[in-house]
Amino acid sequence: MKETAAETTILIVDDEEGIRESVREILSDEGYRVIEASDGTTVLELIRKERPRLVLLDIWMPQVDGIGLLKEIKEQEPEVNVIMISGHGNIHTAVAAAKLGAFDFIEKPLSLDGLLLTVRRALGGSPPSKGNGKSLKRDKGKRRSRVSAAAAAARSLKQKTLRKSVVISGQGLHSGIKTGVILHPLPPNSGILFSGISADTTVPAHLDYVGSTGYATSLRGKGIVVGTVEHFLAVLHSYGVTNLLVKMHGEIPIMDGSALDFCNLIEEAGLQEQDEEWSEIVIDRTYRVGQKGGETISVEPADTFGVRYVLNYPKPIGLQEHTYLYKGPESFKAEIAPARTFGFLKDIENLEKLGLVNGGRLSNCILMDNEKILNTELRFADEFARHKILDIVGDFYLLGRPIRGMVTARMTGHSDNIALLREIRKEMDL
């Protein structure tokens, strides 16, 4: 028999009476049974006696440290979900709590929407759907038959999320701040959603929310900016993850400049196939942006998704070309994910003046002067071209669904990728 809200007990542990009162009123209005503790000394006894499904636990309390208490709860009562709350937290605290078994972490002052969203997820309920997928609309006029044919050819795919929450930390390439991400499974039709620690505002991973494309792709929504999303989105694209909450602060960490760590993170969590289906976008004709003989990117009909990239930079890069055909996440992880971001030493000063690459390190990019690579050995002879393909795979997931088509690009970057996606959306009426 399904448990009702009135049968669900939630324990609030906070030394601030005002916080306990506010949270009690919010949760009681939703029909939950709420019990309280003003400090951590009796929490384990209360859990054993009252059997709450969920504990809201303040980190900073007199007598008992919240992080230490979290560890004890998860050791003695592992089935109880714990949401940590703090007025002095940051992404590092959130990551540390998640690694110790916390279901999630939210900041004070508490947002009503963010609190209820997190509580519902912790109790196994469905949060409000804010999906990033946009279905094909019915169209009148010349494009109708073409769009209908492309929609009919689209394969139905199972939606996927992660089996469990996972975390990873690192440094933002452009902001230079220490950051991290916490990944939470979401129910079908939720989409890929980015949020801050409190999850009161989310930004869908969708073309409509692209904020900037200078040296990286960033998303922007009401009160939140998500920087450098392309490597991470390339992994979600390749592994077929459709529903996910990504909690972070400011910028996705650059890791070693490649996408390998994100591949390992998804594999650590495991994939959960969901009952609902979605469909790919089938390219119906050739779409192209750019100038003939210069920077150009196009996509044409094909039996699978693939990218061919050609670049020609000064020494020590020279002319490089690579063609990638998607054959599943294994092919992506072996062929594209290891390719790292790169830059010339002469450009670093200008980028720093623009407030970029503040997190650039010898360990997270390939650095070159006019003659040679300065800090590493290449993983592939054509690693630079492969990294450009990595960027395209990530940017192309901003249409909200996988694409079936062959991309060909020459000397292009994020702005060109986004321009082509907008052309596809306009012409196919997505």
Image: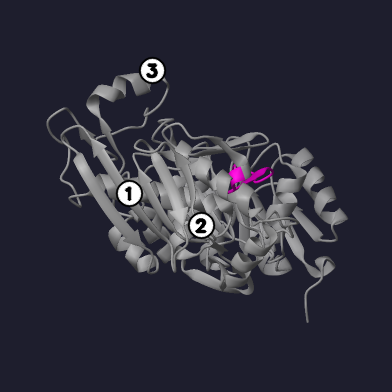
- Check if residue 125 falls in the magenta segment: no
Q: Where residue 277 sits: x, y (%)? A: 63, 72
Q: SS at mark 3?
A: helix
> Residue 31, which numbered label?
none
- Drawn side of residue 399 relative to residue 364, left or right: right
Nearer-the-camera pick, 85 or 192: 192
Question: Which quadrant, please, contains the C terminus?
Answer: bottom right
The residue wearing badge 3 is 353
3D distance between C-alphas at marks 1 and 3:
30 Å
Residue occupying the point 82% across, 71% down: 4
Nearer-the-camera pick, 121 or 136: 136
Viewer-nearest of discs 3 and 2? 3
Q: Amino acid at mark 3?
A: Lys
Name which quarter of the figure residue 290 lies in: top left
Name which quarter of the figure residue 192 lies in: bottom right
The residue wearing badge 2 is 71
- Check if residue 203 falls in the magenta segment: yes
Q: Earlier in the sequence, mark 3 or mark 2?
A: 2
3D distance between C-alphas at marks 3 and 2:
44 Å
The residue wearing badge 1 is 309
Query: Is there CB contact under 8 Å for labels 2 and 1?
Result: no
3D distance between C-alphas at marks 2 and 1:
49 Å
Q: Residues within 10 Å of mark 3 (few under 14, many from 20)?
A: few
Nearer-the-camera pick, 292 or 398: 292
- Drawn side of residue 9 relative to residue 309, left or right: right
Question: Which quadrant, please, contains the N terminus?
Answer: bottom right
Nearer-the-camera pick, 237 or 104: 237
